[in-house]
Amino acid sequence: AQSVSQHNHHVILSEAASLELGCNYSYGGTVNLFWYVQYPGQHLQLLLKYFSGDPLVKGIKGFEAEFIKSKFSFNLRKPSVQWSDTAEYFCAVNFMTTDSWGKLQFGAGTQVVVTP
Amino acid sequence: ETGVTQSPTHLIKTRGQQVTLRCSSQSGHNTVSWYQQALGQGPQFIFQYYREEENGRGNFPPRFSGLQFPNYSSELNVNALELDDSALYLCASSFGGTSFFGPGTRLTVL
């Protein structure tokens, strides 16, 4: 069965530090990949997505992610975080099986806390 | 804001009762999906509706059912509520394979 795993459940870092969140999935076929963010008290927002093409994708708020097909990974990065990046981050995968279009499987999420 | 709205915001029910949650999709989106997000977990796919037909279902029992209307708005119905149904219920409308989420309905079952 397909699965999505996020490596860290909680990350605490200081402002200006670099952030990298890991996401791995298990499936040998085609995938569409997403990172969503949930700020405190707000709804899930799309940070970035990968469908095809350049495996390095840039999203909103200075985030980027790299798809490494050989490692089944889609890690999220930001070179320098701000206090406002405190949020929960979710990796989500659409496993492109029959009739799977638009159906997402999420990781458990990573709570990121940025201290001033 | 995504343009996806959900009602109500919060709801408290008792075990055995039935509940209906509502979602209005973003304009132009004909596909709506529902997800359950338990505390401390990622959202789990319940089912998807496309042009008023159920188009795939996750690992949820039949007491979870839904509808989609001609204007693409949707309802999620849960019968015979159990304590474990307490969660945030998210609606997402999608276009071109990308899902946009509403704010959710927080359901508490006592």
Image (tube, helix red, strand yellow):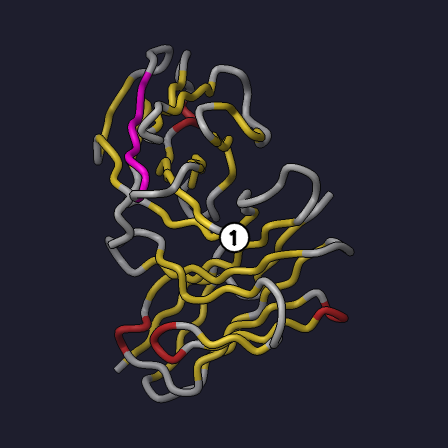
Q: Is residue B27 above or below residue A80?
A: above
- The residue nearer to you, when weighing B43 against A115, is B43
Magenta-span inclusion, residue A48: no
Q: Is residue A64 above or below residue B100?
A: below
Q: Dot 1 corresponds to which residue?
A: A108
B91 lies left or right of B50: left
For label 1, the SS is loop
Q: Chain of mark 1?
A: A
Residue B47 spot, x, y in % from top left: 51, 31
Under mark 1, the amino acid is: Ala
Q: Quadrant of residue A40?
A: bottom left
Residue drawn at x 33%, y 11% as measured from the top left: B17
Residue drawn at x 58%, y 62% as measured from the top left: A51
Q: Is residue B57 above or below residue B95?
A: above
Find the magenta span and give its range: B19-26
Residue drawn at x 40%, y 74% as measured from the top left: A12
Residue B102 spot, x, y in % from top left: 31, 44
A59 lies left or right of B12: right
